[in-house]
Structure formats: C-alpha cells, structure tokens
Amino acid sequence: MHACLAVSPDLMLEYQDSRLPKPLRPSRSWRGFAIEHVELDGSEPFRYQWSGKNHYLALHDIVLTEGEVRVDAIVPDSEHDLRDTITFIPAGHSIEGRSAPVARSNSFTALYFDPDQMREELAHSYAAASPNLAPVL
C-alpha cells in the first residue's frame, strides 16, 4: 500500500503503508518565507522529492536504518544519522530520496524563503523601528 502526503506545496512524502499516522506539521508563513516543523513517528519507509522557486533550508533530527538522498541527480548520499545536520537547496535545484527511519521521534524543521521578497519586507518593517528594536527569545 502507498500513501502520499503533501508536506508543503513543494514537498511530497510517499509512505509505503497508508495506515501510518500522518506527520504532525505545524507551519507558519509570512511574506517571503514559510517555516514548518514536521514530526515523523514510526519506522515505515517513505520517499520524498522537492524542487521549488524558493530556497529550502532544513535542520534535521532524523536517524535512519537505511536511506539515500540525491540532489540534482548528483552522486547520492546515504548518511544514516542526520541529527543536527542542515540541508540547503537553492531555488531551481531539486532533491529526492528515500528514508527508512529508526523507530524514534524523528523530525525536521524547514524554512522556504525568497531573499528578494524578504529584503523588501525587512526594509519596510524595520526601517523606522530599528532604533527601538529589542532582543526577543
């Protein structure tokens, strides 16, 4: 059995078993960027692919029993411990792969951004406020 899940407009996860729970994926978007956190529970294998008009930056907390990722049809990478790793895919490039996660709480946080739109938004939003900006945690 297969189950497909659109994690974002540009990212598709394809599960081998449709009985799997769908990933938890809270997301937020603003002009020029979107961010989402995806939690994958279970160890069922899945496939994914992404290509888009925005840049893609992801921080991973994932451990695999097996898997392979390929960027722009270049030699694949088969690293299995993706904890504290970052993936950056510039706009116009693509990534695809397959993963069989270890049975643990695996997750990743992805940021999709368009630097040109962000530049305009930041310039507009912070130009007048910059003397009064304070740190925020």
Image: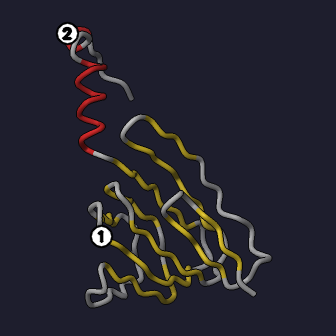
Q: Which of 78 and 48 is in front in this view?
A: 48
Dot in front, 1 or 2:
1
Find residue 133 and report its horizontal and vertical position in percent. Answer: 27, 15
Q: In this view, does 113 lie to the left or right of 38?
A: left
Residue 57 seen:
no
Q: Which amino acid does label 1 sit on?
A: His
Q: Which residue is drawn at 27% across and 27% down?
A: 122
- Name the residue beneath numbered marker 2: 131
Q: Residue at x 44, y 45 (%)?
A: 34
**Structural distance between the alpha carbons of marks 1 and 2:** 39 Å
> What mark, if any, has residue 74 been given in the picture?
none
Find residue 137 and report its horizontal and vertical position in percent. Answer: 39, 29
Looking at the picture, does residue 73 appear above or below residue 41?
Answer: below
Residue 93 seen:
yes
Q: Which of 80 and 93 is in front in this view?
A: 93
Find residue 54 and report its horizontal and vertical position in percent. Answer: 34, 54
Circles 1, 2 touching at the beta carbon (< 8 Å): no
Q: Report helix, strand or loop for mark 2.
A: helix
Q: Report helix, strand or loop for mark 1.
A: loop
Residue 90's quadrant in the figure?
Answer: bottom left
Q: Which residue is drawn at 59% across and 47% down?
A: 26
Q: Which amino acid does label 2 sit on?
A: Pro
- Name the residue beneath numbered marker 1: 93
Find residue 2 and report its horizontal and vertical position in percent. Answer: 71, 83
Give the residue at the far right of this rendering.
19
For marks 1 and 2 on the same chain, the one whose residue lies earlier in the sequence: 1
